[in-house]
Amino acid sequence: VKQLGAYQVQVILDYGVEAKEGEENFDNVTEHFIEAIEFAASQNNVPFVSVKITGIASHHLLETLNDAPRLRSGIHDSEEDNAAWERVKERMHAICEVASEKGIGVLIDAEETWIQDPIDRLTMEMMAVFNKQKAVVFNTIQLYRHDRLHFLRISHQIAEEQGFVLGLKLVRGAYMEKERAL
């Protein structure tokens, strides 16, 4: 980081881990993300940290939330899923809170289409809390997806209606071959 900083190159820290299942592992990854944010804040050339929700949430939970349309409203079929989702939200809030305090942006990575909807919802919730004055939390939009331009428009509309700054990272997308095969 320091060597790149000497050349005025900015760095995005990417702790690209996808945790093993289990609340203890998810809590451990949350702490690593917070440590990365604190390190970034100590450097002049690290304005962002990248976060993978699959590092702090069960893949199975994300699939369950993504698959059932009525679950997208926040109504869950089981108390266990409800509690697990609340813990994911608490972890994400803790990460974003430290980032906001330290002045570091949080880039939420996009994931596969079959788990993306709850990640989008969670990211929008975090933006509504932490992006009042400036963008701290950023969602990632994979532009290979045909539905993302519509999602971008809806996201912008929600941000305007709720009075927060919409933070976005536009990417080509990383899962084209995997999803095409599916």
Image: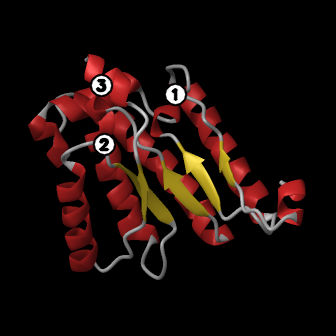
SS under mark 1: helix
Q: Residue at x 74, y 59 (%)?
A: 40
What residue is shown with label 3?
179
SS under mark 2: loop
What residue is shown with label 1?
23
Q: Are marks 2 and 3 in contact (CB under 8 Å)?
A: no
Label 2 vs label 3, nearer the camera: 2
At label 1, the amino acid type is: Glu
**Residue 167 in view (yes/no):** yes
Count of numbered marks: 3
Instruction: Find the distance from the CA under tag 1 to the CA under tag 2.
Output: 33 Å
Q: Residues within 10 Å of mark 3 (few under 14, many from 20)?
A: few
Q: Residue at x 85, y 64 (%)?
A: 7
Instruction: Find the distance from the CA under tag 3 to the CA under tag 1.
Output: 28 Å
What residue is shown with label 2?
144
Q: Which circle's residue, 3 or 1, is located before the other in the chain?
A: 1
Find residue 180 and report its image quarter: top left
